[in-house]
Image (cartoon, grey):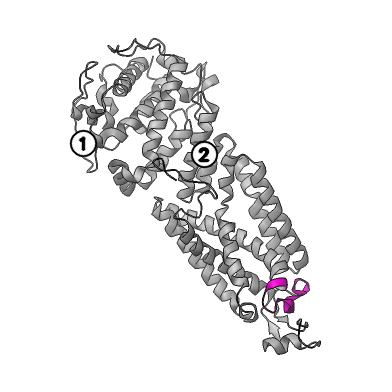
Amino acid sequence: MTGDDPFQRTLSWYLDNVLPADTDTQGRTDPGRAILPPPGHAPVPANIRRALSRPRTLLDPTNTDVRTVFKVLMSLAWLADHWPVDWIPRDLASRMARFQFLVWSFPARFGVGASAEIYDGVQLPELAEQPRPEVDDEFLFAQARLARQHWKQYLDSWEDDPWLASRQDRAPDALESDLAWLVIAWPSPNKPWSDALDGAAVRHWPRGLSSLDLGSVSDGHRVAADTAQHWLHRGSLGGAATALAPTRRAEGRGLLAVYPVAAAVLITLLLTGSGDLARWGAVGLLVFAIAATVVVPARFTPLGLLRVPAAAAVGLAVLVTLSAQWWITPAVWLIGVGMAVFAGLYLVFEARQHGAGVMAAVYRGAINMLVGLLHAAVLSIAVLGFVVPAMGQNGSCLAGWEHHDPWAPLPISASVAGLPAGSTSCAAALGVGQAAAPAAMLMLMTGWSLAIGLAAQILWDDRPVTAPLGRLRRVRGGS
């Protein structure tokens, strides 16, 4: 194979940009050559460290044939599979798991057909206790699935692994990159095949984002769903959507935008004087959202951030039980804005605490705050339209608010049950002649419900508000 061969260029890029792990927690390097031990012999820890830090140290610099390169990488991955646990230093165990997954999954990233050009004729070291396996697609898929599960276990508990935890502190994006390689065939934007390609390779060459297919659809869906939860814990709705459906990222984001757009339309209707249409529309949208969560596959429902409306509902339940003062005071909208700001800052803090970088946390916190405010606003419109007038203290005084100018103070002139009939009964009972403007009430309800709901959700669960709702988390065999 020549240096211009696309497979050769891709493997060279993979060696330099994907396979290398950090040298160690202090960033030291060891310039020596990594030597593979004979089968059945314990490796030298320094050689393992060199190989994982700089895979090229496994290779003879004079030989760049792609099959020879891949044979050496596979040999180390195969030998490590059969070493006793104590042969791999504990501080290198997670890095070895990462290396093995990236090696075994490399052919699968090209798909059946193209991958055969890489491993055709490759023979693994012969082990005494078992016959030498035949290297084909079936064997590589099986090895890659096992290696992915092993590596995923380290990623699932990255806080407990010294190397992953220290790397997270130094490079927050590194773990997210590993998550992407776990489920996506070619997630890196710096692909080595940017030049024009021709010949048979083009028929198999990866184009754009696609799922990493390791020969099992159900296993792929399971890993994608678990990986999406990592993204959600870090506040990344886009990352979770890409992990679940990388080939339909544009369509997925379009579907995710349906609810926010519909919520924005309802808010606009209320603020432009169509309060009656807005409140009925809010109820319809809530019914549609609940029905959608029942119909769509369960792995996609976390993208709806269902903890957010659940938390907002708790906040609204608290608000409805308070005295009428919250909807009488004209400047209540200032409280709502302030509480919305604090809710947004908390969401940034939450993303940061779960491993997102500073700028990523700010961006994701802003997106999640917007989604949260829209969820809270839809619930607030429905509650203001139907619940508060029926169940709030002196709520009957708000009857007919949906037909009033949303930006003007609401005149209080209705009668209150139990009081003498008359146009001033509500005013006499409440001691004021007008309430806050409907728009101001909505702003208070939205900010209040989101902030109080987030505070309440911290008390009922230790997971972030972007985590899936109603699902047990199993850790080390427990819930």
Q: Is residue 211 something that shows in the picture?
A: no
In this view, the residue in front, 160 or 354, is 160
Residue 473: image location, x then y, percent: 46, 45
Q: Separation of disc 1 and disc 2 at Cα?
A: 36 Å
Specify the quadrant of the image occupied by residue 314.
Answer: bottom right
Q: Where 50 falls versus 286 (above or below)?
A: above
Residue 386: image location, x then y, percent: 72, 67
Instruction: Examine the structure image and report whether residue 448 is included in the region drawn in magenta.
Output: no
Image quarter in which the N terminus is found? top left
Instruction: Examine the structure image and report whether residue 394 is included in the region drawn in magenta.
Output: yes
Report the magenta residues as a range.
Answer: 390-404
| Circle 1 residue | 29
Q: Is residue 139 left or right of residue 402?
A: left
| Residue in the image at 58% along x and 52% along y | 306
Circle 1 Cα neighbour tier, 10 Å, few/some/many (<14 / 14–19 / ≥20): few
| Residue in the image at 24% along x and 43% along y | 25
Q: Amino acid at mark 1?
A: Thr
Specify the quadrant of the image occupied by residue 313.
Answer: bottom right
| Residue in the image at 24% along x and 16% along y | 39
Element type where label 2 sits in the image: helix
Q: Is residue 119 left or right of residue 279?
A: left
Q: Where 74 falls versus 94 (above or below)?
A: above
Q: Is residue 247 left or right of residue 385?
A: left
In this view, the residue in front, 11 or 400, is 400
| Circle 2 residue | 225
